[in-house]
Image: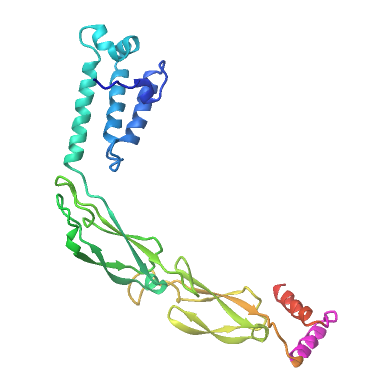
């Protein structure tokens, strides 16, 4: 029993009074969406694509469309002579050629590999050796017999999280003599407990005491190159940022490469506990600054210190 054809207008998603432009527009959209090359994993992609082309072949040819509108799928027999079946046959032959070429020759799929590096490695650049399973050749079922392939991946300075390093021709083998796919190495940069990237600059926070912020101090600040001395001037306000030039991320390889800066945001620590003497001194400070009499509660005094620092 012959397979019953679906309604061509329904296949293209157009009304029966659709214009030629509407039919062409619908066909182009559906053909792009359902082309077998776009849907390599769908078993019915070829059949869907064949239906779309068959429908367009009939509805885009005025005389074939007229016979179809009058007689439906039986138009060949009812109209006599050369029916729209000849148009369908031509379309089917063309689609068959497309599918045969696709089956005979197809580029191999790309493979993905995730490479994790540290914050410092991404900043200064590094070289990593990765190992991936060997890919079976066409017609083989054994995926390399457990063998693995090794590649050296160069991660240049200033590499960002999510960067892709492409190794051409090292993906899955192609079909029918087509080119193999590529191996795409996705670089993932681990978060740092202290630093964060801002372009070529590095940012961090430095905790100092109330007295250091008020009187000034020299503190050790961690950088990509180790600890460096940084002067905190007296009267430093919470949130103030200091710039250490040339201690950021390199713009390129080599010691002579230009580098970004390291930006340090000062955070002032307010003590949670005070001795009697410390409390006495801070109360004296408050009086000399013309403040109202401090609260007699420990919590009230510390809260006032925090408020003072936040002003």
* Closer to us: 219 or 18: 18
Side (left or right) of 31 relative to 194: left
Q: Residue 181 at what x, y percent from top left?
A: 23, 52
Residue at the far front in the pictured view: 1
Q: Residue at x 37, y 22 (%)?
A: 23
Quadrant in which residue 268 is drawn: bottom right
Taking the image as drawn, is residue 156 in sight? yes
Is 168 on the left-hand or right-hand side of 221?
Answer: left
Q: Is residue 60 above or below residue 103?
A: above
Residue 138: where, in percent of width, then height? 15, 50
Residues rendered magenta in the picture: 278-296
Kindly identify the residue that appears in the image at 24 percent across and 9 percent down: 77
Q: Quadrant of residue 142?
A: bottom left
Q: Position of residue 265 (x, y in %)?
A: 57, 74
Give the quarter of the figure containing the N terminus.
top left
Asked if residue 55 is positioned above or below residue 308 in the image, the reply reads: above
| Residue lying at the far right of the rendered structure | 293
Residue at horizontal 49 percent and vertical 81 percent from the top:
222
Quick one: which residue is furthest to the bottom in this view? 277
Q: As displayed, is residue 302 above or below residue 203?
A: below
Residue 74 is a magenta residue: no
Report x, y in % for residue 35: 29, 35
The C terminus: image quadrant: bottom right
Q: Residue at x 83, y 83 (%)?
A: 296
């Amino acid at each position: 029993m012959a397979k019953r054809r679906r309604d061509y207008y329904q296949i293209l998603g157009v009304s029966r009074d659709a214009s030629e432009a509407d039919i062409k527009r619908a066909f182009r959209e559906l053909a792009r969406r359902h082309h077998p090359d776009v849907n390599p994993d769908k078993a019915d992609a070829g059949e869907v694509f064949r239906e779309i082309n068959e429908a367009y072949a009939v509805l885009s040819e005025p005389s074939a469309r007229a016979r179809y509108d009058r007689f439906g799928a039986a138009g060949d027999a009812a109209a006599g002579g050369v029916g729209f079946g000849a148009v369908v046959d031509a379309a089917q032959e063309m689609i068959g050629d497309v599918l045969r070429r696709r089956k005979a020759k197809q580029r191999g799929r790309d493979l993905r590999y995730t490479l994790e590096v540290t914050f410092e490695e991404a900043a200064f650049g590094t070289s990593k050796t990765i190992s991936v399973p060997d890919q079976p050749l066409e017609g083989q079922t054994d995926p390399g017999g457990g063998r693995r392939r090794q590649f050296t991946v160069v991660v240049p300075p200033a590499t960002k999280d999510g960067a892709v390093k492409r190794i051409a021709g090292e993906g899955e083998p192609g079909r029918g003599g087509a080119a193999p796919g590529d191996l795409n190495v996705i670089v993932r940069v681990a978060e740092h407990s202290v630093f964060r990237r801002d372009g070529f600059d590095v940012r961090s926070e430095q905790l100092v005491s109330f007295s250091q912020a008020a009187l000034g101090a020299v503190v050790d600040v961690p950088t990509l190159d180790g600890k460096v001395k940084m002067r905190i001037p007296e009267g430093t306000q919470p949130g103030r940022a200091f710039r250490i030039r040339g201690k950021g991320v390199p713009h390129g390889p080599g010691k002579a490469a230009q580098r970004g800066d390291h930006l340090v945001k000062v955070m002032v620590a307010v003590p949670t506990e005070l001795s009697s003497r410390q409390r006495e001194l801070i109360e004296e400070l408050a009086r000399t600054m013309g403040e109202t009499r401090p609260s007699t509660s420990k919590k009230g005094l510390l809260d006032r210190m925090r408020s003072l620092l936040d002003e």
